[in-house]
Amino acid sequence: MKTSTAARAFSAALIGLSITGAPKRAFADIKDYEFQLVEPTVQAGADRIVTLRLVNKKTGKPVSDAVIFASRLDMAPDGMQEMVTKVTPMSGTEPGTYRFKATFSMAGRWQLSVGAKVQGETGSVESKLLVTAQK
Ligand SMILES: [Cu+2]
């Protein structure tokens, strides 16, 4: 009785080991990439520019030429999911930055949801960033 319980525990430990001991991926993973807000606040009003930086967290380097395929800006953080504003992509000013133009019709917290494809990587980077519009 005791022996078989111990044996079972031992084999369970072995299974655990084989999972955690799996070889680590040598190549970059899509999860290594992250969008960061260059400036977390904007002035409420029309045609404000929001700048994001896409970085490889492992190297700390900016990532250029990502393809933005989705973006949405709404006031979900302040309980106004239905308050959506149009987001217009603009050309970046420096490598690894991505700029968007939007109208922040109301002061408060806005959520910028963005999706992007990175050259040479499978999957996509998806991010939700909090932008605060000030009066
Ligand atoms: Cu609102």
Image (spheres, rainbow, N blue to C red):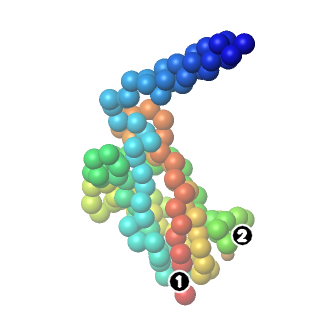
Please give the name of the residue rendered at 47% of the width and 76% of the height, measured from the top-left corner: 41
Q: Relative to the observer, which residue lies in front, 38 or 71? A: 38
- Mark earlier in primary sequence (2, 1): 2
Q: Residue furthest front?
A: 2
Q: Is mark 2 within 8 Å of ligand 1?
A: no
Judged from the image, the quadrant occupied by ligand 1 is bottom right
**Type of the residue with mark 2:** Gly
| Mark carried by residue 134 | 1
- Disc 2 crowd rating (10 Å Cα; few below 14, some 14-19, many 20+) is few
Q: How far apart are the two marked residues, 2 and 1, measured between alpha carbons?
A: 17 Å
| Mark carried by residue 21 | none
For label 1, the SS is strand
Q: Residue under circle 2?
A: 79
For label 2, the SS is loop
Q: Position of residue 60 (x, y in %)?
A: 29, 52
- Quadrant in which residue 82 is drawn: bottom right
Q: Is residue 108 left or right of residue 91?
A: right
**Type of the residue with mark 1:** Gln
Q: Is residue 94 visible?
A: yes
In this rendering, the count of numbered labels is 2
Please give the name of the residue rendered at 42% of the width and 51% of the height, measured from the top-left corner: 34
Asked whether the residues under the numbered discs 2 and 1 touch, taking CB atoms below 8 Å apart as contact, a structural biologist would say no
Is residue 80 shown above or below 72? below
Please give the name of the residue rendered at 64% of the width and 68% of the height, measured from the top-left corner: 77
- Disc 1 crowd rating (10 Å Cα; few below 14, some 14-19, many 20+) is some
Q: Position of residue 91 (x, y in %)?
A: 35, 59
Is residue 129 shown above or below 118? below
